[in-house]
Amino acid sequence: MIIETRKEFPDFVAFVSDVDLKNELETDQVKELDTAINEFSVLVFKNQNINDEQQVRFTKYFGEIEASGNKSNITKAKDRRLSTDLADVSNLDKNNKPFTQNDPRRIFNLGNRLWHTDSSFKEIPAKYSLLSARNISKEGGNTEFADMRSAYDNLDMNTKQKVDDMICEHSLIYSRQRLGFDMVKELSSEEIKNFTPVEQPLVRQNKITNRKTIFLSCHIGKIRNWIRPDSMCFIDDLIEYATQPKFKYIHKWSQNDLIIWDNRQTMHRARPFDDLKERRDMRRTTVLGEEKLL
């Protein structure tokens, strides 16, 4: 197994080769990959023609799988394409046809085009995400990653002191409101309860590397003890700062790529493609976080 970086990002994003994820890995290989994730935050594997079972097995090397269910999306159980071990981040219904333009599931999923961190809206936020490209769009559909460690490192001292002790509310309600998605209209009161806001620190620290990172996401809707308009202005400015080109890697997908990223240290977003006509089949497994942050 070979792990290589590129000179423009010496400590962010590494490319892994000479490994076939259809096969079981040795213990030392898993340790090497886990060390690399902590060091580089994003690992890219090319030409990994795997199935769901193999993706789930590979994911479990890094921890318990976070189930995909009614606290992560609005798709009813009867309408799911995939098992709850996988998050369906495609544009497809259970018949593998693209969602229509006004389908609430499509509009809800457009939130993936905003800068976010997976499952930051859960009491125990996600650790790693693994995304497998089973079918890609002809144009567009890139995924962008931003290094929240470097973003923190480059903050001026006054801003570091301000953010170090900040506590923020996260919820899918907040991110979908940015899109104009009407939760009250589309969901029952019981369904809305699934998206009750949770508080997370704005700055967290990797226990392995000791590097601090900004725990940012479009799911943030309020800063503790701030009014919401001031909160949103501050968070939006911070997201704009943290996603500058110098902090950002843009991945142009090829068929059968697989990417692992560390949600503790990155933000990411999907870019547009012709989702009303093209089929983009992307399947994500998620490693459950290890503990509550507060």
Image: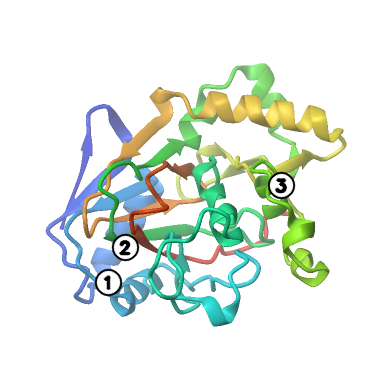
Give the image location of residue 136, x and y in percent. 28, 54
The amino acid marked with disc number 1 is: Thr
The furthest residue to the left: 18
Q: Is mark 2 in CB contact (under 8 Å) with mark 1? A: yes
The reply, left or right, for residue 155 in relation to residue 41 is right
Give the residue pinned by disc 2: 31
Of the two numbered discs 3 and 1 in the rendering, the one whose residue sits closer to the viewer: 3
| Camera-side residue of 116 and 150 | 116
Question: Is residue 235 positioned above or below 63 on the image?
Answer: above
The picture quadrant where one finds residue 166 is top right
Three-letter amino acid code at the position of disc 3:
Tyr
Q: Give the secondary structure at mark 2.
A: helix
Residue 108, image x, y percentages: 59, 55
Examine the rendered structure and indicate whether residue 111 appears above or below residue 237: below
Q: CA distance from mark 3 to mark 1?
A: 41 Å
Q: Residue at x 27, y 71 (%)?
A: 27
- Disc 3 crowd, CA 10 A, few/some/many (<14, 14-19, 20+): some
